[in-house]
Amino acid sequence: MSLTTIYGRNSKCYVLEVWTQPWLRWLLAEAYHWYDMRIYKVPGFGQLERWLQSRHRDEEWTYVPLSCQQDIRCHFLAKRRKTVVATVQLTEQQYCEIKKMLYHGTCNAE
């Protein structure tokens, strides 16, 4: 399920999109995202990555980096093989109620 705000020239509308995705694809996207967000927090990892890249500078086709480098693959994996079941336009009040329920917070829809 995705909750989105779409901005027009003089208007704003809210959309709820319900989708399905194979659970293995979803699990792969979640695992990749977890790895992507945490790998650079390991002490010394950035230095190791730079050292490896300097050693394999001329091997651009055979060298595979250890890190994800915060790339677009995470987004690609999360969106791949999704099937949209329904798309519903919401009012601002409905949007705020759903957002509070999903994200356990407040709604700043203005």
Image (spheres, grey):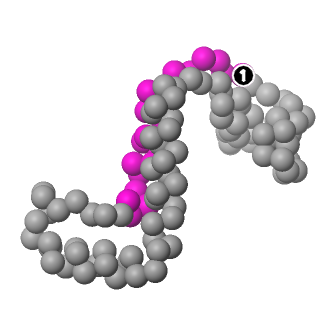
The residue depicted at 23 percent of the width and 75 percent of the height is: 52
| Residue 18, image x, y percentages | 65, 24
- Seen from this angle, which residue lies furthest left? 58
- Determine if the magenta segment contains residue 57: no
Q: Foreground: 46 or 107?
A: 46
In this rendering, the count of numbered labels is 1
Please determine whether, in this image, residue 25 is positioned above or below residue 43: above
What residue did someone put label 1 on?
88
| Residue 83, image x, y percentages | 51, 21
Label 1 sits on a secondary structure element that is: strand
State whether residue 82 appears in this view.
Answer: no
Answer few, some or many: residues within 10 Å of disc 1's Cα (few below 14, many 20 plus, some between 14 and 19).
few
Please determine whether, in this image, residue 8 is positioned above or below residue 91: below
| Residue 45, image x, y percentages | 39, 76
The residue depicted at 15 percent of the width and 78 percent of the height is: 55
| Residue 58, image x, y percentages | 9, 70
The residue depicted at 45 percent of the width and 66 percent of the height is: 39
State whether residue 35 appears in this view.
Answer: yes
Please determine whether, in this image, residue 60 is positioned above or below residue 88: below
Q: Magenta region: which residues?
A: 68-88
Residue 64 is left or right of residue 78, and the answer is: left
Residue 7 is left or right of residue 97, and the answer is: left
- Seen from this angle, which residue lies furthest top? 85
Residue 54 is left or right of residue 2, and the answer is: left
Res. 95 image quadrant? top right
The residue depicted at 66 percent of the width and 31 percent of the height is: 1
Res. 50 image quadrant? bottom left
Identify which amino acid the numbered label 1 is placed on.
Answer: Val
